[in-house]
Amino acid sequence: MKTLPVHWLTEGLIDFEYKKYLLLAYLQEAKSEFQNQRLYPVFSDLIMHYQNLLQVKEHKKLVYEQFPQRISQADFEKLELVYEKIVEDDETMQQIEEIIHFAAPLFGKALDEGKELYEFIERHLEISPVGITPMYFDEGYLFLDIFPGHETQVYLYRMSVFQNNFEKYRGIHTRLLKTIRRGLVLTHENLKVQLLKENQELPNPATFLAVPKVPVPLEQSLLPIAKRSLVKYVAAMAA
């Protein structure tokens, strides 16, 4: 899809009509992605752009940690340098503020649409353990059923815990091992037994099943939401 440059607000021609054209074209693309139930990467992009707008609007220092990891340090430093220049130029800042005033509610509306789609898919995704769950569940297998049909994608997952003085965060990394077709003989439980035989480095792995009740694109929606849902499920077990 057509993307919006990281520095769209401050680079190039600082003109309301021009920036309006760029923004509306991008938001139309984002709307089309959501209509086709493709949530990522557009949802992450919208969050990033909206946070950037709010930071500039409030005349606060841009905070690197609030941006997605795929924004490089160099990109962030450029944002800071450009911001320092525009706040010293009253005329340019007036144009920027006019653009922000127009753009902020549109980003907010698009984010609401993305959140609604996310919650719809999440509500129609069931997470459950396969077999007996061991005490250690930061590493194991994720079975992701593909709707419709009898195919299951098998992922090896590992969770990492990040903690500061206030909160604890869990991150997850997955690696696709294989795609199998289930049947009367090869059930989810039998698949787990098969994996135990194939990989004895994990003698008693935690194994979870994610079953979607609605058809959604795998890479752009199902897998990212399944991973986040698994993190929430495990966090609740650990609480």
Image (cartoon, rainbow, N blue to C red):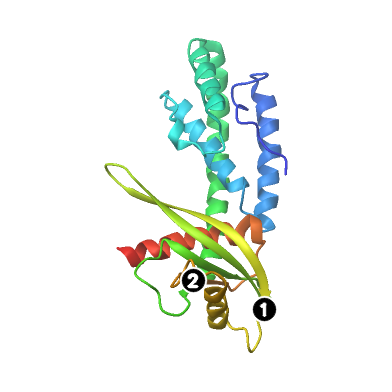
Please provide percent x and percent y for residue 113. 57, 52
- Mark seen at residue 150: 1
Q: Is 103 above or below relative to 224?
A: above
Residue under label 2: 208
Dot 2 or dot 1: first in sequence order is: 1
- Secondary structure found at label 2: strand
Q: For residue 49, what is the image quadrant?
A: top right
| Residue with the most extreme bottom position | 184
Please provide percent x and percent y for residue 159. 44, 56
Q: Is 225 above or below relative to 104?
A: below
Picture quarter with the N terminus? top right
Q: Is residue 89 left or right of residue 185?
A: left
Q: CA distance from mark 2 to mark 1?
A: 17 Å
Within-10-Å neighbours for mark 2: few <14, some 14–19, many 20+ = many
Within-10-Å neighbours for mark 1: few <14, some 14–19, many 20+ = few
| Residue with the most extreme left position | 165
Please provide percent x and percent y for residue 149. 69, 77
- Mark seen at residue 19: none
Please provide percent x and percent y for residue 56. 48, 26
Picture quarter with the C terminus? bottom left
Give the residue displayed 57% in from the left and 52% down from the top.
Answer: 114
Q: Is residue 84 left or right of residue 219?
A: left
Give the residue displayed 65% in from the left and 42% down from the top.
Answer: 27
Residue type marked 2:
Phe
Give the residue displayed 57% in from the left and 34% down from the top.
Answer: 103
Q: Is 37 above or below relative to 62?
A: below
Front residue of 135/47: it is 135
